[in-house]
Image (cartoon, rainbow, N blue to C red):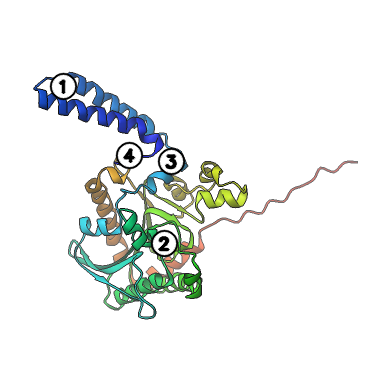
């Protein structure tokens, strides 16, 4: 398994334990005492590291190449998935996955950013950075959900919308803006979950919902830490400092009422245990779907509008200069 720098001691210890187990099995030597000691040391080390993660380290976990993607969650949580393609204007964008599915007995529409598992697939999926046709496809499918009275589930995992010349020529900003506008008026329940990276307008293009949830080690931000550092200090290497001041982690977002709930992940992140992560996500989805599905559509739309109107606090500070005689 790939790992980041702060995970290196954990990976080395896990490798040592596996080597001892293999040696014990092959040579018929009882090394259970040594293995137990190392496993206890590993548990303590994990507790120490993962209970004191910095914002930048959480960003690294959110970007882990083995982290579950939209298609992984679809296969783990849902059945009868029917993918839909194309925006009926330009083409199909593989950075966005859309379709119909069943969550238990409930029919839903699922829309999500999709990254690749390797370099070849990442290039094909454009690293999860959607084009205008991706956002238009998403809205086309969401409107089908509205027509057939199906709740909508949006899974966010993108560094941001694709900023290339072709995307701009085809109306990237307009596509995102229209999605944000139209999601406010969709007459069906909407749940949004940030499962990995939640970058800028690329995330907001499918990010308006009645409930906005976030995975424990995901992040949601107006800009990446590197981009923020490059703009503020003209030095992208100050990304760790930027990650801290951006307040982009799940606890910060919950404190500021940007999101409604944090979904806990297994120790070390979702990439270490897909099944446990999917179980936590499914529990949160079922609970929130049950709640918002019982609200009348008029009240639901009114609450959705007010939810976003309440975000952000304007504080005016008037400095009083000391008057000297």
Q: Which of label 4 and label 1 is nearer to you? A: 1
Residue that appears at 39% across and 80% down: 89
The answer for how far apart the CA atoms under marks 3 and 2 are is 22 Å
User: Which x, y percent locates residue 239?
Assistant: 52, 44
Residue at coordinates 32% horizontally, 45% vertically from top-left?
264
Q: Between marks 2 and 1, how big is the CA–CA gap?
A: 48 Å
Give the secondary structure at mark 1. Answer: helix
Mark 1–mark 3 Cα distance, whole angstroms, equals 33 Å
Give the foreground label among 3 and 2: 2
Between residues 298 and 230, which one lies in front from this camera angle?
230
Looking at marks 3 and 2 on the same chain, the residue that comes earlier in the sequence is marked by 3
- The span from disc 2 to disc 4 (Cα, nearest Å) is 26 Å
Residue 186 falls in image quadrant:
bottom left
Quarter of the image where the N terminus is located = top left
- For the point 44% across and 56% down, the residue is 159
The residue indicated by pointer 4 is: 268
In the rendering, which numbered label is found on residue 95?
none
Question: Callout 1: few (<14), some (14-19), or many (20+) C-alpha neighbours within 10 Å?
Answer: few
From the viewer's perspective, tell me whether residue 249 is left or right of residue 26. right
Q: How many marks?
A: 4
Asked if the residues shown at circle 3 and circle 2 are in contact, with their CB atoms under 8 angstroms apart, the answer is: no
The residue that mark 2 highlights is: 129
Q: Which residue is mark 1?
A: 32
Residue 152 or residue 269, whichever sits in front: 269
Q: Please, is residue 112 above or below residue 2 in the view? A: below
Residue 218 in percent (x, y) is at 39, 49
Task: Give the crowd class for mark 2: few <14, some 14-19, many >=20 residues within 10 Å.
Answer: many
Q: Of the residues under marks 4 and 1, which one precedes in the sequence?
A: 1
Residue under label 3, please give it: 57
């Amino acid at each position: 398994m790939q790992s980041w720098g702060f995970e290196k001691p954990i990976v080395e210890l896990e490798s040592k334990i596996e080597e001892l187990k293999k040696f014990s099995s092959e040579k018929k030597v009882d090394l259970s005492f040594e293995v137990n000691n190392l496993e206890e040391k590993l548990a303590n080390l994990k507790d120490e590291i993962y209970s004191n993660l910095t914002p930048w380290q959480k960003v690294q976990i959110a970007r882990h190449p083995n982290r579950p993607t939209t298609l992984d969650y679809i296969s783990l949580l849902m059945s009868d998935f029917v993918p839909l393609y194309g925006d009926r204007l330009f083409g199909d964008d593989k950075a966005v996955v859309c379709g119909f599915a069943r969550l238990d007995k409930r029919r839903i529409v699922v829309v999500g950013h999709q990254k690749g598992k390797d370099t070849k697939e990442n290039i094909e999926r454009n690293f999860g950075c959607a084009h205008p046709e991706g956002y238009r496809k998403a809205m086309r499918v969401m409107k089908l959900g509205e027509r057939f009275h199906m709740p909508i589930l949006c899974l966010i995992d993108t560094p941001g919308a694709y900023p290339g010349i072709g995307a701009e020529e085809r109306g990237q900003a307009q596509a995102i803006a229209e999605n944000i506008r139209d999601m406010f008026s969709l007459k069906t329940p909407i749940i949004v979950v940030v499962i990995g990276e939640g970058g800028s307008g690329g995330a907001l293009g499918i990010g308006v919902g009645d409930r906005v949830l976030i995975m424990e080690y995901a992040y949601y931000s107006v800009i990446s830490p590197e981009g923020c550092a490059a703009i503020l200090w003209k030095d992208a290497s100050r990304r760790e400092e930027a990650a801290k001041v951006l307040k982009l982690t799940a606890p910060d977002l919950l404190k500021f009422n940007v999101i409604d709930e944090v979904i806990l992940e297994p120790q070390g992140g979702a990439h270490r245990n897909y099944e446990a992560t999917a179980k936590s996500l499914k529990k949160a989805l079922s609970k929130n779907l049950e709640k918002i599905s019982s609200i009348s559509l008029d009240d639901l739309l009114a609450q959705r509008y007010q939810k976003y109107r309440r975000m952000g606090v304007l504080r005016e500070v008037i400095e009083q200069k000391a008057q000297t005689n």
